[in-house]
Image (cartoon, helix red, strand yellow):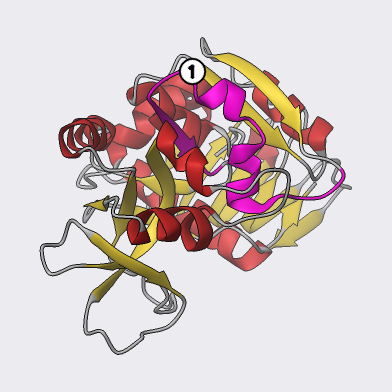
Amino acid sequence: LNVPMLAYPMHLAKAGGVNEAMINLHHLPETVRSAASQLNSEMQLSFVDEQPEILDSGGGIKNVEAFLSRDDNFWVLNGDTVCLFDSVEIMLRMLSQHRASGAIATILACPFPEGKGLGGVFVKDDQVGIDHFSKTDRGTGLTPFHYIGVCLFSKSIFDYLPEGKPSNIFYDGVTAALKDGHKAEVVIARDAAWFETGNKADYLAATSSCLSHLASAESSKRAYLEQLLDTFSPNWRAGFQAEHESTRLFDSSLKSTEKISVGRFAVVGPGVSFGEELKLNSSVLLAGASIEENTVVDSDIVL
């Protein structure tokens, strides 16, 4: 929706009281730095470039222990998580539960999205305590939930992460802490709308769904999404149009947008250039894309 995907976790981080964050870099680090610079965030941002070896979810956290352990508790948010909620109050709920329980980890989860596999966070019958993590059902009969990229940890988690080598925060760190007598808990966001974005088809489907929430006065996610866009793309309303047959979100700086026809949905970023006529169907044109005259773009992402 014409904001860097980092905007989605940053919106949640702000709601969780975060005023200083470390962004972990590895693949295309300058691209991520550029995306962060577009956010105009009041948050103080630092960067660490995880080289030469990628350290996985636990090793990446251990790598910045000096930064994260300055407080008793710290948040970890996936940089590519796109998830909508009814309210950012979910973050305050997590914080309150984490402080009250003394858990080493509090993990945000949701019921499994349609089409998503079974593996995940297996929760005890109390629907709060975490029993184990697994990619398959071990026959325990416990309910699995889907992890959606937001965690709150006690700094004592560092005692269970090996120094200087890859590790998984759940399968290594939290699992070892559970065996050592610590407890870990979930907060279940039953209202969450979580989106896969790791390939073109999923990215376009996520875009379509988010636009539908934005266009619907009846959607419980509309206000949440409006608040996010107001923060990170203040002029978005000038380029938003929802009609019966199509929904469009064009960057407000674009000129001559009447030359663009839209089928189903389209998002067009800043600095896009195009000829006399452009037909878009279920497509996204990212910032700076250049399109030839009389072009039809169908179910595609144009860089």
* Outermost residue to the bottom: 139
Locate residue 96, reporting x and y percent.
19, 31
- Residue at 62% x, 55% y is 167
Q: Which region of the structure is painted magenta?
A: 52-78
Whether residue 233 is visible:
no
Res. 136 image quadrant: bottom left
Q: Is residue 76 magenta?
A: yes
Locate residue 120, reporting x and y percent.
40, 69
Q: Is residue 68 magenta?
A: yes
- Residue at 54% x, 38% y is 249
Quadrant location of the N terminus? top right
| Front position in the image: 91 or 185 | 185
* Outermost residue to the left: 126
Amino acid under label 1?
Arg
Locate residue 258, reporting x and y percent.
64, 36
Residue that label 1 marks: 70
Locate residue 212, reporting x and y percent.
38, 51
Whether residue 214 is visible:
yes
